[in-house]
Amino acid sequence: MQIVGELVDNHILISKSRDVGRLYNKSRFGETVKGNKLRLSLLEGVFLLDEGKITVFQNKEELDFQNLVTLAAQQIPRFEIKYLVFRDLRKRGHSVSLCKDQKDIDFVISNKDMNSCFVVSFSERDIVTIDGIKKLVTAAEKHDSSLWFAIVDEEGDLTYYDVKNVYLKGHIKKHVFRKEKGFVFENRVIIFDKTLSEQLHKNEFFGKPLGNGLQLSPIEALYLVKNGILTLKLVDTGKKLSLEAFTDFVEQYQPDIKSRLLVFEDLKKRGLIVKTGFKFGAHFRAYTKQPNETHAEYLIHVVDKSFTSSWADVSRAVRLAHSVNKEIIFARTDTKDIDYVQLGRLRP
């Protein structure tokens, strides 16, 4: 027998105890209220009507799907996006309900076989901010919940991301190197000393061999100068460059070099090998072990706290990382603080 609901004050009330049991006890829809009744949200009501599970009346007149969707869209901001996510998760068998305690969280999944999970819905047209992501991750962590982003594209298809802070840790020990000269070319530095070149490359995978020497990227050179391993000279004039002068030199064509160096140094402290990620569309690729033992596990993109992006750009970054068996990490910099946020594709 069809379940009957009554639209009252932007909710749908189910009165028969048998129907309450079918929807609440068995399928975890709605919330019980005084009088042993069940109150459904408009999202739940639209879904159940769409599935042919209930009939909804208002003032003794039956509401069809168009009527109820129109009413719901008038009451619920971004109804179509939220409904498509809610419907998809329900059809996948998840026990999903509206989140009432967290302002920016749309849904809570409370399946028996998993910890609670917060879900946030987005349109592919939305602009994403790294600060917004950080706040959502922090809210989820405070409640010991995982966090999913559900992105609805223009055709109504969904892409899900698992979003979390990560603690990166590698197994590369810091070595002691003797001091030597490096020569500055247009956009790289070359060490001609054979012994130091071999040690730098073998022990911490710095640079790339060039003859008997080693060519370094600007950020590798900055790191080695800052740690007292290199002194620098311009190759054409022989003029010595201080750390500050070389930083200014590099900043002319890499304006964000200070933020990148901050992350590079932190990753080195964490025991990772850090190399350019240019071929993968990221700032860095990072290894937890020597490259002859493993491929780079992470692609790291450095962003400051004001970073914004389209979901299309984020999607490309995540898809590319997964296609080469790596994880994409956004390193959010704020003065001297760094947050590492990972976005990974998932099948909910």
Image (spheres, rainbow, N blue to C red):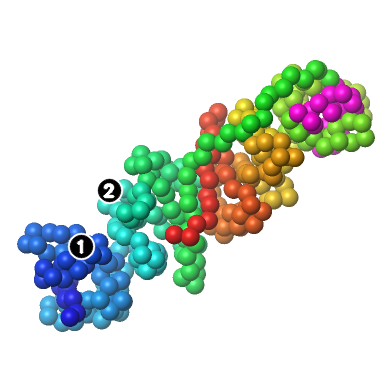
Which residue type carries mark 2? Asp
Query: Looking at numbered disc 1 in the image, what kind of residue is underneath it?
Result: Asn
Residue 116 is left or right of residue 149, and the answer is left
Mark 1 secondary-structure assignment: helix
Q: Residues within 10 Å of mark 2 (few under 14, many from 20)?
A: few
**Foreground pick, 240 / 98:** 98
Identify the secondary structure beneath mark 2: loop
Task: Determine if the magenta segment contains residue 194.
Answer: yes
**Could you say which quadrant of the image residue 199 lies in?**
top right
Query: Which span of residues is magenta-colored?
Result: 181-203
**In which image quadrant can residue 119 be found?**
bottom left
Residue on which the image places disc 1: 25
Residue at 46% over, 42% down: 134
Q: Residues within 10 Å of mark 1 (few under 14, many from 20)?
A: few
In percent of width and height, residue 194 lies at: 89, 26
Say which residue label 2 marks: 101
